[in-house]
């Protein structure tokens, strides 16, 4: 049985989901929650396989629930079921580990397919926007890892500041180092990344998701 917690602030939605999963035969609904705090408490009590989460929740919204799950080490796989989703929320949800996104307007059978696929370790993103968001997050994370392997932590700090338009004196003041040290770091960045100037540093930072 796939152990599930449901989280949505609309009782009718919760009732419908509960009936759908119980009739499917391979799901066990452990608890239905109508708020973010309630959801986190249920997750800590039950440690379910899956959480079906609406992002529009009272007290703590779905994004904050996801952040709290990460900080508390709650590893339940999450499927977002929502009526609408902004690109920013979608990017943040995927970055925080959401494995599935289903719009409420979709057929119920698609939700069941999504839950089974996510439970088995897969991903399910229902529309092009969601797929594009996932690809953007994956590219950004891969770029950040590549930058971290190439540059030191201090050099990455400097790259971000250069990319935001700070001059050497401003960087030196923020990092509490001399302008000469800033120039040395910058030369190292040029050499390691193969760029020739500050414009190149900004392009590098954008490509690697550092800004």
Image (tube, rainbow, N blue to C red):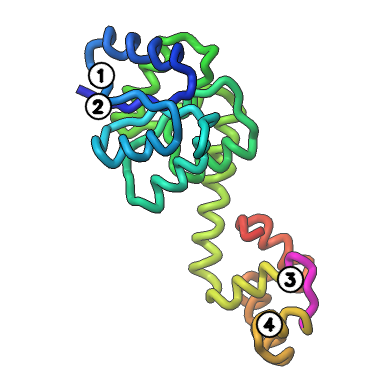
Which one is earlier in the sequence, the residue at label 4 or at label 2?
Answer: 2
Left of 87 or right of it: where is 141?
left
Q: Earlier in the sequence, mark 4 or mark 3?
A: 3
Mark 4 Cα shell of 10 Å, populated few (<14), some (14-19), many (≥20) = some
- Quarter holding the C terminus is bottom right
Asked which secondary structure carries label 3, the reply is helix
Q: Is residue 141 above or below residue 166?
A: above
Q: Nearer the viewer, residue 33 or 72?
A: 33
**Residue drawn where x is 32% and y is 22% of the image:** 116
In the picture, measured across the screen, residue 173 lies left or right of residue 76, that is right
Q: CA distance from mark 2 to mark 1?
A: 6 Å
Mark 4 near mark 2, Cβ–Cβ under 8 Å?
no
Q: Is residue 99 above or below residue 137?
A: above
Q: Residue at x 55, y 40 (%)?
A: 135
Is the Cβ of the residue at disc 2 closer than 8 Å to that at disc 1?
Answer: yes
Determine whether label 3 and label 2 are within 8 Å by CB. no
Q: Residues within 10 Å of mark 1 (few under 14, many from 20)?
A: some
Check if residue 167 falls in the magenta segment: yes
Given residues 57 and 28, the one toward you in this image is 57
Q: Mark 3 or mark 2: which comes first in sequence?
A: 2
Mark 1 or 4 closer to N-term?
1
157 lies left or right of 169 = left
* Gap between marks 4 and 3 measured at Cα: 13 Å
Q: Residues within 10 Å of mark 3 (few under 14, many from 20)?
A: many
Please name the residue that numbered disc 1 is placed on.
27
Q: Which residues are magenta?
A: 163-168
Residue ID for mark 2: 3
Magenta stretch: dominant secondary structure = loop
Which numbered disc covers residue 187? 4
> Could you say which disc has been placed on residue 162 in the image?
3
């Amino acid at each position: 049985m796939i152990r599930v917690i449901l989280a949505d602030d609309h009782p009718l939605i919760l009732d419908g989901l509960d009936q759908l999963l119980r009739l499917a035969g391979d799901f066990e609904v452990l608890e239905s929650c109508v708020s973010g705090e309630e959801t986190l408490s249920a997750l800590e009590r039950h440690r379910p396989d899956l959480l079906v989460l609406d992002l529009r929740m009272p007290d703590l919204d779905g994004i904050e629930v996801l952040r709290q799950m990460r900080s508390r080490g709650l590893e339940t796989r999450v499927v977002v079921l929502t009526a609408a989703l902004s690109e920013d929320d979608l990017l943040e949800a995927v970055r925080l580990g959401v494995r599935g996104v289903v719009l409420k307007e979709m057929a119920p059978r698609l939700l069941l397919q999504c839950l089974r696929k996510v439970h088995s370790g897969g991903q399910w993103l229902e529309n092009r926007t969601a797929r594009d968001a996932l690809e953007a997050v994956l590219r950004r994370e891969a770029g950040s890892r590549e930058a971290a392997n190439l540059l030191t932590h201090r050099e990455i700090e400097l790259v971000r500041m250069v990319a935001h338009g700070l001059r050497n004196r401003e960087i030196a003041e923020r990092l509490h180092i001399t302008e000469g040290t800033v120039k040395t770091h910058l030369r190292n960045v040029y050499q390691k990344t193969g760029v020739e100037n500050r414009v190149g540093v900004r392009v590098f930072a954008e490509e690697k998701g550092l800004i």
